[in-house]
Amino acid sequence: MTIGKSILMRMFGRPKGSLGRVGGIIMARMNRKVAAWAIDLLGVHPSDRVLEVGFGPGVGIQLLAESASSGRVVGVDHSKDMVGQATVRNAKAIKAGRVDLRQGSVERLPFEDESFNSALAVNSMQVWPDAVAGLREIRRVMKTGGRIVLAFTRHSGQPKSGLTDALTAASFTGVRVTETDDGFCALATKP
Ligand SMILES: C[S@@+](CC[C@H](N)C(=O)[O-])C[C@H]1O[C@@H](n2cnc3c(N)ncnc32)[C@H](O)[C@@H]1O
C-alpha cells in the first residue's frame, strides 16, 4: 500500500488515532447529504429496528434515530475512535435506550437472525475485506421483506458497477441503483 493510501485508510477507511478523529470530523460534514438521501430511500417506519454498518462519526445514526422515533437504531463499526465520536453525537438517544452502538465487524454481527427491518451502509462496503460475505451477514440479521441501502459519495472509491452483482450474489432481490450529483445508492430486498 502506498503512503498516501495508508493515510487515507487511517483517516477514512478504518479511522484510527488522531488522523482518524480528524477524518471523522471531515466525514460528518461531507457525507451528511448522501446519508440523508439514503435514509429517505430506506423508508424507515417510526417503530422499525434499523442496523447501520460502518457508521463512522454517527451522523447517519442520528438521522435514523429521528426516523425510527419509537423504534431502535443499532450500529456496528470497526473503529474504536468512530464508536467514540458517534457515541458523543448520539449521547441523548443512547441514554434513552433508542440507539445502541457497538465496535465490531460486518463479517460477524453480534445479532440473532431476522433482527432488523432494514439496514444501511454509507461509504463503507468498499473497505470491507469481502463485500459479498459482509452483505450475506447483513442479510442473515435482516427480517424477510426487509430493505437494504448501500450509499456512496462520489469520492468513496466504490465503483457503481458491480453493486448489483454483489447484492445478487448475497441473495438480495429487486436491486435498483440510483444516483444524484452527490453520489449513488443501491437498494435491494431480502426475499
Ligand atoms: C469511509 S468511513 C464512512 C463513515 C460514514 N458512514 C460516512 O459516510 O461518513 C467507513 C467506515 O466503515 C467502517 N468499517 C470499515 N471496515 C469495516 C468492517 N469490516 N465492519 C464494520 N465497519 C467497518 C470504518 O471504521 C469507518 O467508520
Image (cartoon, grey):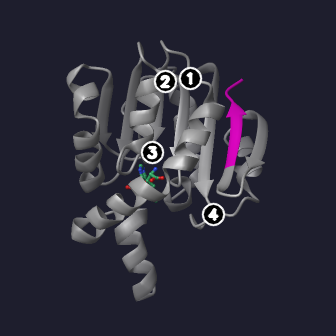
Characterize the local packing of mark 1: few (<14), some (14-19) or many (20 or more) Cα atoms within 10 angstroms: many
CA–CA distance between discs 1 and 2? 6 Å
Nearer the N terminus, badge 4 or badge 2? 2
Q: Residue at x 70, y 38 (%)?
A: 187
Q: Which residue is mark 2?
A: 67
Tell me: 21 left or right of 161.
Answer: left
* Secondary structure under the numbered disc 1 in the rendered image: loop
Percent x, y of residue 120: 54, 38
Q: Which residue is mark 3?
A: 106
Q: Residue at left 40%, top 27%? A: 73
Q: Pointer 2 and pointer 3: residues touching (CB < 8 Å)?
A: no
Dot 4 falls on a residue whose secondary structure is: loop
Residue 100: quadrant of the picture: top left
- Between 125 and 60, the one lying in front of the other is 60
Decide which of tag 4 and tag 3 comes sooner along the chain.
3
Which residue bears the numbered disc 4?
A: 154
Q: Nearer the viewer, mark 4 or mark 3?
A: 4
Q: Amino acid at mark 1?
A: Val
Is 159 a magenta residue?
A: no
* Cα distance between the residues tagged 2 and 3: 23 Å
Q: Nearer the viewer's eye, disc 1 or disc 2?
A: 2
Query: If you read the primary sequence from the N terminus, does the residue marked by circle 4 or circle 1 appear first?
Result: 1
Packing grade of label 2 (10 A; few <14, some 14-19, many >=20) is: many
Element under disc 2: helix
Res. 44 mark: 1
Quadrant for the C terminus in the image:
top right
Contact, mark 4 vs mark 3 (Cβ under 8 Å):
no
**Quadrant, the N terminus:** bottom left
- The stretch in magenta equals 185-191
Q: Nearer the viewer, mark 3 or mark 1?
A: 1
